Image (cartoon, grey):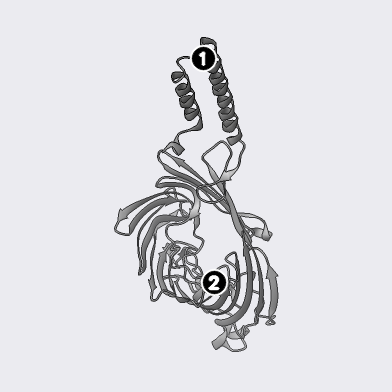
Amino acid sequence: MFGRIPFKTALIGVSAAVLLGTAPAAANEIAELKAQIEALQERLAKIEAAQKEAEKTTVTAGETGGWKLPGSDTSISISGYVKGDFYVDNRPASGDTFNAPAIPLDDHKDATDDDGNVGMHARQTRLRFDTHTPTEMGALNTRIETDFYGDGSVLRLRQAYGSLGPVLAGQAWSILGDDYAAADTVDFDGPVGSIGVTRKPQLRLTLPLGEGFTGQAAVEPALQGNELPTFLGALRYGSDWGTVNLTGAAARADEEGQNVSAYAFHVGATLNATDATQLMATYNVTNGFSGRIWGGGDGTVMDAAGKLKAQETMGGVAGIAHRWSDTIRTGAYFGWVENDTGDGVTALGAAGTNKSLQTLHANVIWSPVPQANIGFEVMHGWREVNPRANDAEDAIDPAKATKGEATRVQLGVQYGF
């Protein structure tokens, strides 16, 4: 136990023992020893003060990775990755992602250039800043995350939020989505039918409910200028065998002085079939929510009588992922979307809008080191639109004027830090 006694305490104790054990010593010798002890105490105090001062400027390891800001309990970390994407299309370019809603239609004069395309970019490159500070009310965490998918490849804000205990405020993933049942694709957008455009400004509450259950509630921006925000709720369950997520949203949509009720619903599940194989499936329905399902149509439409109607979109994704080794994994994902413009909508209003979409993504991803992912992916998409008035005269084959298919092959090279 002696080894645990601070040096300063031990030194004073030894000195006291010397004083008590030298009763015959002369008074001047005792006074000299007292002076030496006081000098040692003063020197130790200066050393301790110097150590505390040094701690204010010394960088130490953080609690959650990264490092601590000198003189504080806040840990900070910087992470992200650089990613280069290289792709080949068999049809005219759909953009830097596989844009199924814009697949060219077959045998139509609008598709004047039906040649393929080769492209490359680094827009998915991502930068993230995180902080972690322990407090009496729980952990205070912040995150700022960016990539280059803004207009013209400019830097754009992906996430910027802070959380203290169960409360999160800022821009983050919407709780309508499902991180567990997300497709692991090389393409940035992934399969249609998934919950898209899911990073939203919000105020969120997350509470553990016990036995693997978690509840969430949030408010997000209003739809189309309505004065009321969007209200969302989620119930999530996780265990060793997989996950189940039920989420929903409700709001009002305004247009031209009219308003309609809007809602969205998501159910997603994953199943760990084996230690190396996971199955996933999602089903999503929106009514009046524009863009919440990737590949979905407008949130609202006008019928022939000029009455505002909510447009319903249904979609989903089913997939399988398998890890062959610590460095190689594969995945295959099928997504689908069906858009219903609603009864009473004029033919002109529905003409040319996407009626249905399907996509198939299949990939193999190699991670030679934990910080690197090199992925090869093949994508194919099917698109069908509502008939247009001029299809019969402008199409080479009117039966094919409302349909189109496209294929993309992509290589993605990602290096993380």
Residue positioned 49% across, 70% down in the render: 183
Q: In which quarter of the image is the N terminus?
A: top left
Q: Is mark 2 on a helix, strand or loop?
A: loop
Question: Residue 30, labelled with which disc?
Answer: 1
Q: Is residue 176 above or below residue 402?
A: above
> Residue 170: x percent and y percent?
50, 47
Q: Is residue 279 above or below residue 141?
A: below
* Residue 343 visible to an observer of this rendering: no
> Residue 299: x percent and y percent?
47, 63
Which residue corresponds to mark 2?
185
Nearest the eye: 386 or 291: 291
Question: Residue 164, labelled with which disc?
Answer: none
Nearest the eye: 131 or 107: 131
Q: Residues within 10 Å of mark 1 (few under 14, many from 20)?
A: some
Q: In which quarter of the image is the C terminus?
A: bottom right
* Residue 211 visible to an observer of this rendering: yes
- Dot 2 amino acid type: Thr
- Dot 1 amino acid type: Ile
Residue 328: quarter of image = bottom right
Q: Which of marks 2 and 1 is in front?
A: 1
Q: What element carries label 1?
A: helix
In-image side of 400 versus 302 (left or right) = right
Tell me which numbered mark, 2 or 1, is placed earlier along the sequence.
1
Measured in 3D between alpha carbons, the distance from the residue under mark 2 to the one under mark 1, in whole angstroms, is 81 Å
> Residue 233: x percent and y percent?
36, 56
Nearest the eye: 275 or 213: 275
Question: Residue extending furthest top?
Answer: 27
